[in-house]
Image (tube, rainbow, N blue to C red):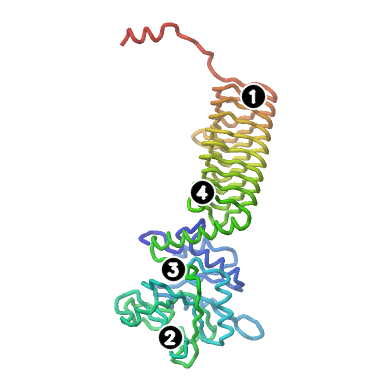
């Protein structure tokens, strides 16, 4: 990845890549989820509650990672039998709960010591190749990360290892200590477990995943972009099937944790990030929305920017070139255009004129502005926080409001106009 950021922490549609397989494992019914990290424990702060961490002391390959995880695996009390141990890769993010469940079912049905998820790729470059025996079971997996790992014949195989396995816990526990680093990269490869199991007379099976998109790995930013496009398409499809109109999916970005209600319309060139929640029958036009709450019937944009903490109540509007941050906009309130509202509360049915600005920062601290219900601000009004504009109040155009405006009053704060006669002529003569 050529990055200071660990590969599995690169963002994929709003969350780190690692959390995609973690969530899939949980949705598939995993009793425990254990994530393997380096001694730096960079992954730990991002793990959901209940997800355990195991530390791999040295970066000695996938086999070493699973060795570290097995130290944390306890026997599951299920009629005296251990459940399957499923191994997922943090850089294979699109694996689905269904694919995981199907692998576990296939493993249970075969009574094999190990079952791997494989898929067939038109271009298998960079993937370990699955070598099958005459009876169709898996003989071994040949890595291809470095020249010399695989023969020319093996490189012609298109069935590849996805890095996803189901093991008998006891078979895995007994075999891991026998792994060797006899390969071009000098690492402990987990697929060697399959070869060792075969040599011990155990059966190894492969369950082919038909949709290769679910098992695509990410080794660089090109692959990450490819996977992001697939993930984004799935997110769009989920929303559209639930009753949301995404007018142009190819020009719309929606993060995985975004919630959108039925009959909402998302128009082109809109980006919706984070844990934003949007209600029913809203319209979002060409805007950028991050970690916000929009209730039913809200209208945003075009060219709106809703920043974290913005809450737009039912039927409110944030119009053209409006920026809102950490503010609560009341039901039916309107901020039609060219305004910045930060750290403010706006009451219901208020209408803020063009270029209404809350000056919320004094150079040392942020302060809040309180705007009551049915307030009307004139164009080019600056509200210098902390200030309170009470219910039903007005402000005059061009005012800089530094003191509270009482209910129903008109606040005006500007110099009286003075016309200088003959100014243009004197300017010309002076030049």
Are discs 2 and 3 less than 8 Å apart at CB?
no
**Label 4 to label 3, Cα distance in Å?**
26 Å
Q: Residues within 10 Å of mark 3 (few under 14, many from 20)?
A: many
Residue under label 4, please give it. 271
Question: Viewed as shown, does residue 376 lie left or right of 146?
Answer: right
Question: Viewed as shown, does residue 54 lie left or right of 277?
Answer: left
Residue under label 3, please give it. 217
Percent of width and height locating residue 95 = 52, 69
Residue under label 2, please give it. 132
**Label 1 to label 4, Cα distance in Å?**
34 Å
Between residue 377 and residue 407, name the one nearer to us: 377
Percent of width and height locating residue 111 = 56, 87
Examine the image and state in which quarter residue 138 appears.
bottom left
**Label 2 to label 3, Cα distance in Å?**
22 Å
Front: mark 2 or 3? 2
Q: Residue at x 47, y 70 (%)?
A: 212
167 is higher (above) or lower (below) than 285: below
């Amino acid at each position: 990845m050529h990055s200071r950021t660990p590969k599995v922490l690169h963002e994929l549609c709003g969350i780190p890549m690692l959390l995609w397989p973690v969530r899939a494992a949980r949705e598939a019914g995993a009793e425990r989820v254990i994530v393997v990290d380096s001694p730096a424990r960079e992954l730990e702060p991002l793990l959901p509650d209940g997800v355990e961490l195991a530390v791999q002391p040295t970066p000695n390959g996938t086999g070493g990672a699973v060795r570290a995880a097995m130290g944390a695996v306890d026997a599951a009390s299920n009629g005296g039998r251990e459940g399957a141990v499923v191994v997922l890769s943090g850089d294979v993010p699109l694996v689905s709960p269904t694919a995981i469940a199907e692998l576990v079912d296939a493993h249970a049905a075969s009574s094999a010591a190990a079952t791997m998820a494989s898929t067939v790729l038109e271009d298998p470059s960079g993937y370990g190749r699955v070598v099958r025996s005459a009876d169709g079971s898996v003989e071994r997996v040949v890595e291809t990360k470095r020249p010399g790992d695989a023969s020319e014949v093996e490189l012609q195989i298109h069935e590849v290892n996805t890095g996803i396995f189901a093991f008998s816990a006891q078979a895995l526990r007994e075999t891991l200590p026998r792994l060797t680093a006899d390969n071009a990269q000098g690492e402990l490869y987990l697929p060697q477990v399959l070869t060792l199991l075969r040599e011990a007379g155990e059966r190894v099976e492969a369950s082919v995943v038909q949709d290769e998109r679910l098992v695509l790995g990410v080794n660089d930013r090109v692959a990450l972009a490819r996977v992001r496009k697939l993930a984004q398409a799935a997110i769009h499809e989920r929303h559209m099937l639930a009753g949301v109109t995404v007018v142009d999916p190819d020009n719309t970005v929606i993060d995985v944790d975004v919630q959108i209600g039925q009959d909402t319309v998302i128009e082109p060139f809109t980006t919706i990030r984070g844990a934003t929640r949007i209600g029913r029958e809203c319209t979002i036009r060409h805007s950028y929305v991050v970690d916000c709450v929009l209730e039913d019937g809200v209208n945003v944009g075009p060219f709106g920017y809703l920043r974290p903490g913005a809450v737009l109540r039912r039927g409110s509007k944030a119009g053209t070139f409006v920026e809102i941050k950490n503010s609560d906009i009341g039901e039916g309130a309107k901020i039609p255009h060219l305004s910045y509202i930060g750290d403010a509360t706006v009451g219901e049915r208020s209408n803020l004129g063009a270029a209404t600005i809350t000056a919320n920062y004094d150079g040392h601290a942020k302060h809040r502005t309180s705007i009551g219900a049915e307030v009307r601000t004139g164009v080019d009004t600056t509200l210098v926080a902390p200030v309170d504009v009470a219910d039903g109040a007005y402000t005059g155009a061009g005012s800089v409001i530094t003191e509270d405006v009482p209910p129903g009053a008109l606040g005006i704060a500007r110099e009286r106009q003075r016309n200088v006669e003959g100014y243009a002529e004197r300017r010309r003569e002076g030049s």
